Image (cartoon, rainbow, N blue to C red):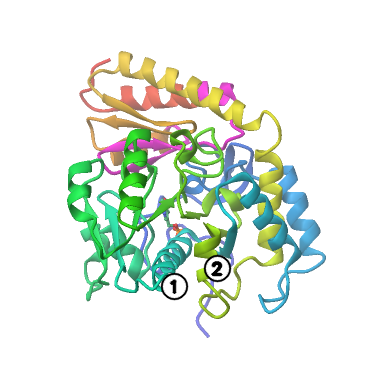
Amino acid sequence: MKPVASKPSAGPSASVMPTYNRFDLVFERGEGSWLVTTKGERFLDFASGVAVNALGHAHPVLVAALTEQAGKLWHTSNLYRVAGQERLAERLCAATFAERVFFCNSGAEACEGAIKAARRTQFKRGKAHKNQIITFDGAFHGRTLATIAAGGNETYLEGFEPRMPGFHVLPFGDLAALEQAVDDSTAAIMIEPLQGEGGIRVASDAYLKAIRALADKHGALVVFDEVQSGVGRTGRLFAHESSGVTPDIMAIAKGIGGGFPVGAFLTTEEAGQAMGAGSHGSTFGGNPLAMAVGNAVLDVILAPGFLAEVQSKGLYLKQKFAQLKDEFPGVVVDLRGEGLLQGIRVVPPAGDIVKALIGQKLLAMSARDNVLRVAPPLTVSTAEIDDAVNRIAHAFRSLPKTAG
Ligand code: PLP
């Protein structure tokens, strides 16, 4: 037997596959918007596990739901009814366009399921030739073979050929290009109403409306990926709600589990019916532990006043970022985002700023387009927003050769 360390070693373990460039930080516990390392250092968490910990760390409602369920039942498989799954599905349907829900464990799986449901719906309509999916540059739908083809990011595709066929990646926001591309072979147009990884790019309400109209004209479906933008992140339950447009299929994950792995795709009755018995499955999807947490997340997020508060905190954060833009014209290019998913497009490499923020004990993220991205817990306080903005200002000041 090879020796195994019982504690985190001085550096990253060589036994973990090197797919991530990780910061050399090991967190031991979390409280609300704060994370504490094994060395006792406290970090203000404006990353939330890439927009996952919607209610921060160790939220008492989630801890109670998970521990109570843990003492009763963990897993039964989907060969039997799962009470928590039925309840969460009914609540998600009541709160959205949807009439059917399939539960899985991650965002990529939710997107894969959404793509399958789109093709299967066309197949059930007798239109099996309508099997092409239109997506947009900057999109991120996950790391499976289908979702890297859907995203079209060459870096993520490199070395994984052959590329899965059936995806057409168009420029984001270019309606003329879309009008040209949609044809009788189009099964669905798939879009993030607010691109997270792609640089906090918001699809305008008018653009979403035009996508819906074009899809309807050609008998294509609309698929929204709200894995990052959904579950209260924008101050609405789902980002697309402001447009008045509804999709046929929607992928969700991240926030709905509050840190427990939960994903789902939601569909109309037609698309849900198309996914009949045997068409899809997941061993772990919708298991009792996941569903207990998902229901508890909704208990908090759907409570009266919660989303209104996210909206007002989002506005507050936006104002604070606008002040940073005034104070640091040499660093800040523009501001993006909604609610508590916001970005600052910066002049210096965004990755350098994320590193400088580690020095300030603030966790943030970068996104494409050289954007510094923040996604604090939806439970963040305005005092914590002030604190984070001060840390960002300090980091900007510490950058070499910056004005302000
Ligand atoms: N879709 C979007 C919009 C995402 O932001 C992500 C993850 O960041 C995914 C899909 C993939 O989710 P996961 O990493 O859980 O597979």
Residue 124's label in the rendered image is 1
Residue 324 within the segment the image draws in magenta: no
In the picture of the structure, the residue carrying the numbered disc 2 is 273
Residue 349 rendering spot, x and y as whole percentages:
24, 37
Residue toward you, 206 or 362: 206
Residue 157 location in percent, x, y?
Answer: 25, 65
Neighbour tally class for label 1: few under 14, some 14-19, many 20 plus, Cα within 10 Å: some
* Magenta highlight range: 360-386
Q: Nearer the viewer, residue 151 or 319?
A: 151
Q: Is residue 197 visible?
A: no
Answer with left or right where residue 335 lies relative to residue 105. left
- The residue under label 2 is which amino acid type? Gln
Q: Is residue 364 magenta?
A: yes
Residue drawn 74% across and 43% down?
60
In the drawing, does residue 358 fall left or right of residue 265? Answer: left
256 left or right of 274 in image: right
Q: Horizontally, is 404 left or right of 45 in the view? A: left
Quadrant of the rendering where the C terminus is positioned: top left
Q: Position of residue 218 (x, y in %)?
A: 30, 56
Tell me if label 1 and label 2 are in contact, CB under 8 Å: yes
Q: Residue furthest bottom?
A: 1
Q: CA distance from mark 1 to mark 2?
A: 9 Å
